[in-house]
Image (cartoon, rainbow, N blue to C red):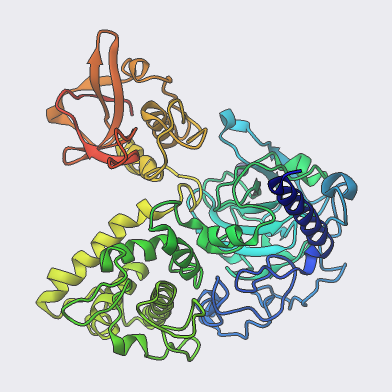
């Protein structure tokens, strides 16, 4: 036996042992990532990773501050105890434990109590675009968490009106998310960062968003909703079927799971968009409060420093997040600690450390957002919360307050602050995991504008030859006609399905001259004897959104914005 095979055997035995231990102690195991437990425990949570004491206060109805050591505090009309009693929890546990888990007890319940709902639409309906099950029930019916887990999204989402996403790890060690949709604003009773238990009331049935009557849209997403997983039919799963392994967040290795943001809202950062060593910090910093996402912080980091850690501006701003020294050491009113803390645990809080700078950026942005929320509620400022928060980061909180909104006091507010805000908001979608904010919903605008908006949600997706179609990306990405097909299908609410190839798509709609180009027109190019080889979506100003294969390692590939080529011809399909 070689040394290497002995090593592998030892590794296998170790992994086997770890598996055994995880299965046995899972309900109370501490996630080594910052000590945040993915399951069960409601002990005091650390300041980073989505559960900051002040971070979630602004999300509480009425802005009430609370002591987050009680993670179950919620907007429910009646107080919810730390462990739901049988009478308060959903009594309808599901499935055969041995079947579902392989070993150990299972904690799954139905999302609605038995007898309170009927299945009104199944998984895979509407031509395969329906990625969950619809459970029709009376408006206001209590929705229960199906499992132990962490709330990683709670609030508005495109298409869903509102949604709740809970990340969990099954007794078989597999990560998955449960998604609950269509609640009214008043029917969401948990917040990002909350720990929930199987059978705990978390929401009430509504009919918000893309919905024709009160129902719960429910999804099960092995691998994680924000971490590369994909939906399965929830009904067999609720009946006790095992959670399949479909990729996404890893099951046993806690480090990758933390790095991906599994169990935190940080999972909404698109993969591979920031320098790899910074990714974990943007994910964690973007989990501090629901208003400030990892993709926003990444776009802001790009604008501030271009991700150059030694950056030093003439005005004295320092590091990745361009902190002025005085700001870095200022006290965060949310928790009484300086904005820049020793997030990476190397013993020093420094704007020159990656983790300290980026977590400090998230802490400062969240603190500003909380102030803007209160200023808006007092009628002292008006405008978009995120835009005003960015403006305050750039020009100072006083500038926003003095201007009653977007800074308008000095020339620099127009020449610097406003372009700063506009640039970051324009870049943010590139850093956002596709579809992480919910399903795309056509808006009340032209068909072409909807096609562009739909295509935007896939910016940054990888180019995969033969990938994509009406349902969106497949095989991990999209090719040119896969992208146009996905965007047109989404923008037409599923009424227009384009054929598979660029050549075939050239038969759709009607040709329009280049002089009449409008956003949403399909752009065909590279014409051969049989027709065009390439297709994209005109986005305005001579640009188009296209999924392009990189021609070499330095060129951009994937869904990106490129110039319309000289031989292009247009067709309008909506
Ligand atoms: Zn549905």
Taking the spot 16% from the left edge, 41% from the top edge, the residue there is 541
From the viewer's side, name the closer residue of 325 and 482: 325
Query: Percent position (x, y) of residue 419?
Result: 19, 64
Quarter of the image with the C terminus in it: top left
The residue lying furthest to the top in this view is 529
Is 176 in front, or is 311? 311
Q: Nearer the viewer, residue 18 or 361?
A: 18
Q: Quadrant of residue 77?
A: bottom right
Above or below residue 557? Residue 508 is above
Q: Residue at x 58, y 62 (%)?
A: 258
Residue under the point 28% across and 56% down: 426
Q: Quadrant of the N terminus?
A: top right
Task: Residue 9: tell me if it is visible.
Answer: yes
Image vertical order of residue 199 relative to residue 445, above or below: below
One can see residue 111 in this view: no
Q: Quadrant of ligand 1?
A: top right
Residue ID at (45%, 69%)? 291
Residue 171 drawn at (x, y percent): 79, 55
Whole-percent x and y of residue 465?
A: 43, 27
Where is residue 516 drawn, in percent x and y?
15, 30
């Amino acid at each position: 036996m070689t040394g290497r095979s002995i090593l592998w055997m030892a590794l296998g035995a170790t992994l086997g042992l770890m598996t055994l231990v995880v299965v046995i102690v899972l309900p109370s195991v501490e996630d080594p990532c910052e000590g945040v437990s993915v399951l069960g425990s409601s002990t005091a949570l650390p300041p980073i990773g989505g559960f900051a004491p002040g971070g979630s206060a602004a999300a509480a109805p009425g802005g009430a501050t609370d002591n987050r050591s009680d993670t179950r505090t919620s907007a429910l009309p009646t107080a919810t105890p730390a462990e739901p009693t049988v009478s308060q929890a959903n009594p309808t546990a599901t499935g055969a434990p041995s079947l579902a888990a392989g070993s150990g007890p299972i904690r799954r319940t139905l999302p609605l109590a038995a007898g309170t709902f009927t299945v009104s639409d199944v998984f895979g309906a509407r031509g395969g675009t329906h990625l969950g099950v619809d459970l029709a029930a009376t408006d206001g019916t209590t929705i229960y968490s199906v499992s132990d887990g962490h709330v990683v999204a709670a609030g508005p989402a495109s298409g869903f009106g509102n949604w709740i996403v809970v990340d969990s790890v099954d007794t078989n060690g597999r990560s998955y998310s449960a998604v609950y949709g269509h609640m009214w604003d008043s029917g969401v009773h948990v917040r990002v960062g909350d720990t929930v238990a199987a059978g705990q009331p978390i929401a009430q049935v509504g009919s918000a968003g893309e919905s024709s009557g009160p129902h719960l849209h429910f999804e099960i997403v092995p691998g994680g909703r924000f971490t590369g997983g994909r939906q399965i039919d929830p009904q067999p799963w609720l009946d006790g079927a095992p959670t399949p392994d479909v990729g996404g967040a890893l099951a046993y290795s806690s480090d990758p799971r933390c790095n991906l943001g599994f169990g935190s809202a940080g999972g909404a950062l698109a993969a591979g968009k920031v320098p790899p060593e910074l990714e974990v910090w943007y994910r964690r910093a973007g989990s501090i409060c629901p208003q400030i996402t990892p993709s926003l912080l990444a776009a802001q980091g790009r604008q501030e420093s271009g991700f150059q850690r030694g950056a030093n501006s003439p005005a004295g701003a320092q590091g990745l997040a361009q902190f002025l020294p005085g700001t870095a050491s200022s006290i965060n009113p949310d928790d009484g600690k300086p904005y820049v803390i020793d997030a990476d645990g190397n013993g020093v809080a420094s704007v020159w450390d990656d983790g300290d700078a980026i977590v400090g950026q998230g802490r400062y942005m969240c603190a500003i957002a909380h102030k803007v929320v209160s200023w808006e509620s007092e009628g002292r400022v008006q405008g978009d919360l995120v835009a005003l928060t960015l403006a305050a980061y750039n020009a100072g909180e006083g500038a926003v307050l003095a201007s009653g909104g977007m800074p308008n006091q000095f020339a620099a507010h127009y020449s610097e602050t406003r372009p700063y805000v506009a640039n970051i908001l324009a870049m943010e979608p590139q850093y956002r995991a596709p579809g992480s904010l919910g399903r795309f919903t056509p808006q009340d605008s032209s068909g072409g504008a909807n096609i562009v908006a739909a295509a935007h949600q896939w910016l940054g997706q990888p180019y995969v030859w033969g990938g994509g179609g009406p349902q969106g990306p497949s095989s991990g990405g999209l090719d040119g006609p896969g992208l146009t097909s996905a965007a047109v299908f989404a923008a037409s609410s599923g009424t227009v399905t384009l054929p598979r190839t660029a050549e075939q798509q050239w038969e759709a709609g009607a040709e329009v001259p280049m002089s009449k180009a409008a956003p949403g027109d399909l752009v065909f190019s590279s014409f051969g004897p049989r027709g065009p080889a390439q297709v994209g979506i005109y986005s305005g100003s001579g640009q188009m959104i296209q999924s392009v294969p990189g021609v070499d390692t330095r060129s951009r590939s994937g869904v990106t914005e490129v110039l319309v080529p000289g031989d292009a011809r247009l067709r309008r399909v909506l």
